[in-house]
Every structure is written in structure tokens, then in C-alpha cells.
Image (spheres, rainbow, N blue to C red):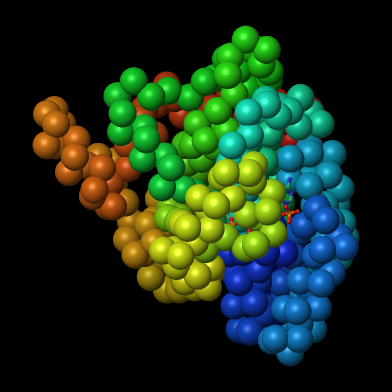
Amino acid sequence: MEKTVIITGANSGIGKAAAIRFAREGYQVIIACRNLEKSKKAQAEIIGLTNNRRVDLLRLDVSSFESIKDFCSEFKQGYPRLDILIHNAGYFKHGEKNYQLSQDNIELSFATNVFGPFLMTQLLADMLKKSADARVLNAGSTNIRHFFEPKRQIDFDNLQGEFKDRRPYNSYKMYGDSKMALLMLTFKMAEQFKQDGIKVNMVQIPAIKLSPETVAQFKSGWRMAARVQNLFSAPPETMADTYFHICTSEEFKDVTGKLINDQREIMQSSHYTGGFMQELKQFRDQRVYPRYADEAGNIERVWDLAVAVTGSFVGL
Ligand SMILES: NC(=O)c1ccc[n+]([C@@H]2O[C@H](COP(=O)([O-])OP(=O)(O)OC[C@H]3O[C@@H](n4cnc5c(N)ncnc54)[C@H](OP(=O)(O)O)[C@@H]3O)[C@@H](O)[C@H]2O)c1
């Protein structure tokens, strides 16, 4: 039976490489993208490379609740079931100094990387339940490793622009905070959907070669840094293969509520305690993540916030 996969932000980088991988394997692929002009070219390229004509483009701005609602309605009208949902789209703008708000008045990294994927998963849960092996994968980042620093916290009080005129905006920190929040929602949604057989995991992505279009969006100065980093980074296809493995293999069939690294190892909460050497070891150990992610109070706080901001759309 043909399987259906949705990949958000599949017009470039890892998302496009993943769309090519799934299309090659004969999947019905939906590329969910906001910029239709640019994405039509990506769609044609994916079809041309794979000879799979079942690559559809549906409009989605994942930072907008209204757009997510429209996307999910359109998907439900056109397709019988959803097997795999990959929340790959991500917002991160190197060097951005001005606080960015989404059209729903939410800080843009959180709107795109946290509340969008949360709302979309909730709205598509009924379609995922129809699959015999439903898997949701969230795109994480090694940036969350800054939470090994004991004082590091998510700035919960500034996610709707409360202090936007008084606190300096650090897009790098906001990005890390948003990926940490998404990890906590991954844990909680895995529990929420366990009885429905929907598996929810996150993959921790290290530096991967960025496309020239993405680099061009960075503030000047940061562009050069990104080009240098690109010289030492793996191509997007390596991470696309990992997406494919986590979402299709027998190995991960029953795995849920986990953070998985780029070596495809299931990561654990850090067991390192006290002392400089321990902290150093913990930072270098790619099999552990910061304990902050496991603290029940933090998880509840992110969950309550996600429910509160998306409430009128999702009805939780
Ligand atoms: N590359 C890395 O080093 C790295 C490291 C850690 C984590 N990651 C994560 O990996 C994922 C893929 O990143 P990438 O490296 O492949 O970068 P990319 O090529 O810039 O891809 C990002 C994609 O997200 C899309 N996107 C952004 N905001 C969106 C929105 N509001 N609605 C719909 N689509 C949106 C972009 O679409 P547009 O073309 O319309 O902008 C683009 O297709 C992201 O979640 C990123 O955070 C990447």
C-alpha cells in the first residue's frame, strides 16, 4: 500500500533532500511550503530526479495558525491517510537584532519551530491514526546543548513581545530556546498519542551544509561565517537519509518520545554531575542531552503555553 509523507520546508536543504529520498522510494510526497513560486521549481526538480509524479505541493506557512488550519483542511480533502509527518521547516536568521513577531503575535522562532508543529500535529492526528505505523519527526538542533550551562533557561516571559523594546533580541538564543521547547513537546506528545500508535521523536541535527539561498538571507558578516562553516559540514543528503531511517525502519518502529542523534543513537538525559571535567565530558558526549529537557515543570510550562496560544484552533 502506498504511504504518504508530509515534509515541511521541502523546497531547499535537508527538506528537499528528504523529499527526493522518499520520492525515490515510491512514497506519495507532500511538500508543504510557503513560497509557491520557489517551491514549484523544487517540486519539478524532485519529480525530474525521481520519476515519481506523486510529489504534490501544498501551501503552508508554518508560522501562521490560519495557514496551518487551511493546509490541514486541504490535506484532509485530498488524501485518505497520513503515515509520516516531518516537521523540517525552521526559522533561524543569523545576526537578526530586531525582535521578530509572527502574524499571530508570537516570537517568530517559537511560532515556526514550536507552536506551528504542535498545532499541525494536533490537527493531523486523526489522519495519522488511520495509519498502521504513524511516525512524526521533529527537526532538532545541537544548539540545545547550551542548556548544559546550569543557568540557561527559556525566556518564557518574552515569547509574545512583552519585553521586545527593553531586552536585546538574540536570534541564536531564541532559536536554541525554541528547539528545546520543541524537544519537550516531543516528549509530551509521544505520551499523548501513545495509545493511538502514533510515534513522535526528534532528531538532533548538527551543522549541515546550507543552501546558497539560505546563506543569502543572513545578515552581512554572518554570510561569510556560514560559507566557512559550509566547508566543514556534511551535505543535506546525509541528514535526509537519517530522517528516512527514523521514519521507515524496523529499528525505530516502536520508538517514541526520544531524541535521536545524527549517528541514529537514542540519546539519554545527561548523567554527568559536578565539576569542570564532568561538564566538559557531558558537552562532548553526543549520546546525552541536557537534564533541563526532562524537568516536569518545564515540560508542563511549554505544554500549557502551546495549548494556550493555539487553543482556539485546536480545542484541547
Ligand atoms: N543546516 C544546519 O546546520 C542545521 C543545524 C541544526 C538544525 N537544523 C534544522 O534543520 C531544518 C532544515 O534546515 P536546513 O538546514 O535544511 O535549512 P533551509 O535550507 O534554510 O530550510 C529551511 C526550510 O524551512 C522553510 N521555512 C522557514 N520558515 C517557514 C515557514 N514559516 N513556513 C514554511 N516553511 C518555512 C524554508 O522555506 P523558505 O524557502 O520559504 O524560506 C526552507 O524550506 C530546520 O528545522 C533547521 O532548524 C539545520
Q: Quadrant of the C terminus?
A: top right
Q: Taking 168 as reference, is 148 above or below it?
A: below
Residue at the (19%, 35%) spot, across then down: 279
Q: Nearer the viewer, residue 80 or 201?
A: 201
Q: Quadrant of the N terminus?
A: bottom right
Image position, residue 68 (x, y; %): 79, 45
Residue at the (63%, 28%) spot, across then down: 97
Residue at the (75%, 67%) spot, across then down: 30
Image position, residue 15 (x, y; %): 63, 64
Is residue 11 found left or right of 302 in the rendered image? right
Q: Nearer the viewer, residue 260 or 187?
A: 260
Q: Taking 37 as reference, is 53 above or below it?
A: below
Image position, residue 125 (x, y; %): 67, 50
Image position, residue 78 (x, y; %): 86, 65
Residue at the (72%, 78%) spot, across then down: 46
Q: Taking 206 as reference, is 171 above or below it?
A: above
The answer, for residue 115, to whether it is visible in the render is: no
Mark count: 0
Q: Taking 107 as reference, is 290 above or below it?
A: below
Could you say which quadrant of the image residue 31 lies in? Answer: bottom right
The answer, for residue 14, to whether it is visible in the render is: yes
